[in-house]
Image (tube, rainbow, N blue to C red):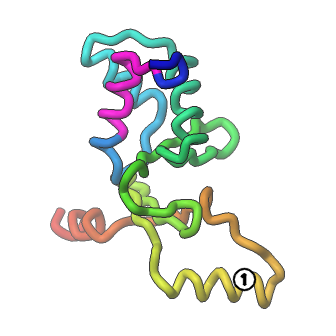
Protein backbone atom coordinates (compact mmCIF):
# COMPACT_ATOMS: atom_id res chain seq x y z
CA UNK A 1 0.00 0.00 0.00
CA UNK A 2 1.43 3.38 -0.96
CA UNK A 3 1.78 6.16 1.58
CA UNK A 4 -0.75 8.19 -0.40
CA UNK A 5 -3.48 5.58 0.19
CA UNK A 6 -2.50 4.88 3.78
CA UNK A 7 -5.57 4.86 6.02
CA UNK A 8 -5.29 5.55 9.71
CA UNK A 9 -7.90 4.74 12.33
CA UNK A 10 -8.68 8.45 12.59
CA UNK A 11 -9.21 8.68 8.81
CA UNK A 12 -11.59 5.71 8.93
CA UNK A 13 -13.51 7.25 11.84
CA UNK A 14 -13.76 10.60 10.05
CA UNK A 15 -15.22 8.89 6.96
CA UNK A 16 -17.56 6.88 9.22
CA UNK A 17 -18.82 10.10 10.84
CA UNK A 18 -19.23 11.91 7.52
CA UNK A 19 -21.17 9.00 6.00
CA UNK A 20 -23.45 8.78 9.04
CA UNK A 21 -24.18 12.52 8.75
CA UNK A 22 -24.40 12.76 4.96
CA UNK A 23 -27.71 14.65 5.06
CA UNK A 24 -26.25 17.66 6.88
CA UNK A 25 -23.18 19.86 6.96
CA UNK A 26 -20.67 19.22 9.70
CA UNK A 27 -17.86 21.32 11.11
CA UNK A 28 -14.38 20.28 12.24
CA UNK A 29 -15.51 20.69 15.87
CA UNK A 30 -18.29 18.10 15.30
CA UNK A 31 -15.74 15.63 13.94
CA UNK A 32 -13.29 16.40 16.75
CA UNK A 33 -16.00 15.78 19.37
CA UNK A 34 -16.94 12.48 17.70
CA UNK A 35 -13.32 11.33 17.61
CA UNK A 36 -12.84 12.23 21.28
CA UNK A 37 -16.04 10.33 22.17
CA UNK A 38 -14.55 7.26 20.47
CA UNK A 39 -11.26 7.67 22.34
CA UNK A 40 -9.22 9.13 19.47
CA UNK A 41 -7.20 12.31 19.96
CA UNK A 42 -6.35 14.11 16.72
CA UNK A 43 -5.10 17.65 16.17
CA UNK A 44 -7.64 19.87 14.37
CA UNK A 45 -5.06 20.74 11.71
CA UNK A 46 -4.85 17.02 10.87
CA UNK A 47 -8.64 16.89 10.51
CA UNK A 48 -8.57 19.97 8.25
CA UNK A 49 -5.82 18.47 6.06
CA UNK A 50 -7.74 15.23 5.62
CA UNK A 51 -11.01 17.08 4.88
CA UNK A 52 -9.22 19.19 2.26
CA UNK A 53 -7.88 16.00 0.65
CA UNK A 54 -11.38 14.48 0.63
CA UNK A 55 -12.73 17.70 -0.88
CA UNK A 56 -10.09 17.70 -3.62
CA UNK A 57 -10.90 14.03 -4.32
CA UNK A 58 -14.63 14.86 -4.66
CA UNK A 59 -15.66 12.71 -1.68
CA UNK A 60 -16.99 15.67 0.31
CA UNK A 61 -18.18 19.18 -0.47
CA UNK A 62 -16.59 22.08 1.35
CA UNK A 63 -18.77 25.10 2.04
CA UNK A 64 -16.66 28.16 2.75
CA UNK A 65 -18.05 30.18 5.63
CA UNK A 66 -18.56 33.87 6.05
CA UNK A 67 -15.81 35.80 7.83
CA UNK A 68 -15.49 34.66 11.41
CA UNK A 69 -17.28 31.34 10.81
CA UNK A 70 -15.85 27.88 10.31
CA UNK A 71 -16.26 26.07 6.99
CA UNK A 72 -18.74 23.21 6.79
CA UNK A 73 -18.37 19.87 5.04
CA UNK A 74 -20.80 17.34 3.59
CA UNK A 75 -20.18 13.77 2.51
CA UNK A 76 -21.26 13.11 -1.08
CA UNK A 77 -19.10 10.04 -1.80
CA UNK A 78 -21.20 7.49 -3.63
CA UNK A 79 -24.53 9.32 -3.28
CA UNK A 80 -24.97 9.90 -6.99
CA UNK A 81 -25.38 13.62 -6.34
CA UNK A 82 -23.26 15.79 -8.57
CA UNK A 83 -23.07 18.65 -6.09
CA UNK A 84 -20.97 20.79 -8.37
CA UNK A 85 -23.88 21.04 -10.81
CA UNK A 86 -26.81 22.02 -8.60
CA UNK A 87 -27.80 24.35 -5.79
CA UNK A 88 -28.46 23.32 -2.19
CA UNK A 89 -30.94 24.20 0.53
CA UNK A 90 -29.82 24.21 4.15
CA UNK A 91 -32.18 24.21 7.11
CA UNK A 92 -31.04 26.73 9.70
CA UNK A 93 -32.70 24.69 12.47
CA UNK A 94 -31.52 21.10 11.91
CA UNK A 95 -28.76 21.76 9.30
CA UNK A 96 -30.30 19.24 6.88
CA UNK A 97 -29.15 19.59 3.26
CA UNK A 98 -31.50 19.23 0.31
CA UNK A 99 -30.05 18.84 -3.18
CA UNK A 100 -31.93 20.93 -5.76
CA UNK A 101 -31.67 18.66 -8.75
CA UNK A 102 -34.94 19.76 -10.36
CA UNK A 103 -35.45 21.41 -13.74
CA UNK A 104 -36.82 24.59 -12.17
CA UNK A 105 -33.40 25.44 -10.74
CA UNK A 106 -31.91 25.09 -14.22
CA UNK A 107 -34.47 27.68 -15.37
CA UNK A 108 -33.28 30.03 -12.63
CA UNK A 109 -29.65 29.50 -13.63
CA UNK A 110 -30.54 30.24 -17.27
CA UNK A 111 -32.55 33.33 -16.29
CA UNK A 112 -29.70 34.70 -14.18
CA UNK A 113 -27.28 34.17 -17.07
CA UNK A 114 -29.54 35.45 -19.87
CA UNK A 115 -31.04 38.45 -18.10
CA UNK A 116 -28.29 39.45 -15.69
CA UNK A 117 -25.13 38.15 -17.39
CA UNK A 118 -24.19 36.29 -14.22
CA UNK A 119 -23.00 32.68 -14.15
CA UNK A 120 -23.79 30.78 -10.95
CA UNK A 121 -21.14 28.58 -9.37
CA UNK A 122 -23.36 25.88 -7.93
CA UNK A 123 -20.80 23.91 -5.96
CA UNK A 124 -20.71 26.49 -3.21
CA UNK A 125 -24.24 27.86 -3.56
CA UNK A 126 -26.50 27.34 -0.57
CA UNK A 127 -29.91 28.86 0.08
CA UNK A 128 -30.90 29.03 3.75
CA UNK A 129 -34.36 28.47 5.20
CA UNK A 130 -36.43 26.11 7.36
CA UNK A 131 -37.22 22.57 6.17
CA UNK A 132 -40.68 21.00 6.16
CA UNK A 133 -39.97 18.80 9.20
CA UNK A 134 -38.79 21.71 11.34
CA UNK A 135 -41.77 23.87 10.29
CA UNK A 136 -44.15 21.01 11.18
CA UNK A 137 -42.39 20.50 14.52
CA UNK A 138 -42.80 24.22 15.27
CA UNK A 139 -46.54 24.02 14.45
CA UNK A 140 -46.96 21.09 16.85
CA UNK A 141 -45.34 22.91 19.77
Seen at 50% across and 86% down, the residue is 103
Q: Tell me the quadrant of the picture where the N terminus can be found.
A: top left
Q: Tell me the quadrant of the picture where the C terminus can be found.
A: bottom left
**For residue 21, above or below residue 23:** above
Whether 138 is among the magenta residues is no
Residue 80 percent across, percent down from the top left: 39, 62
Residue range highlighted in magenta: 6-18
Q: Quadrant of residue 11?
A: top left
Instruction: Check disc 1 and report its element: helix, strand or loop.
Output: helix
Apparent side of residue 107 relative to residue 83 in the rendered image (left or right): right
Seen at 79% across and 90% down, the residue is 115
Seen at 35% across and 67% down, the residue is 131
Q: Which residue is mark 1?
A: 112
Residue 86 percent across, percent down from the top left: 54, 69
Determine the residue located farthest toward the right in the rendered image.
117
Nearer-the-camera pick, 23 or 56: 56
Determine the residue located farthest toward the left in the rendered image.
140
Q: Quadrant of residue 113?
A: bottom right
Seen at 41% across and 21% down, the residue is 7
Amino acid sequence: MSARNYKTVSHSKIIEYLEANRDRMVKVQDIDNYLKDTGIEVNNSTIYRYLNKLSNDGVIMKYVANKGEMSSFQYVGDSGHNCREHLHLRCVRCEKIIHLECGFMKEIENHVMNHHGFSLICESSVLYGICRECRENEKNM
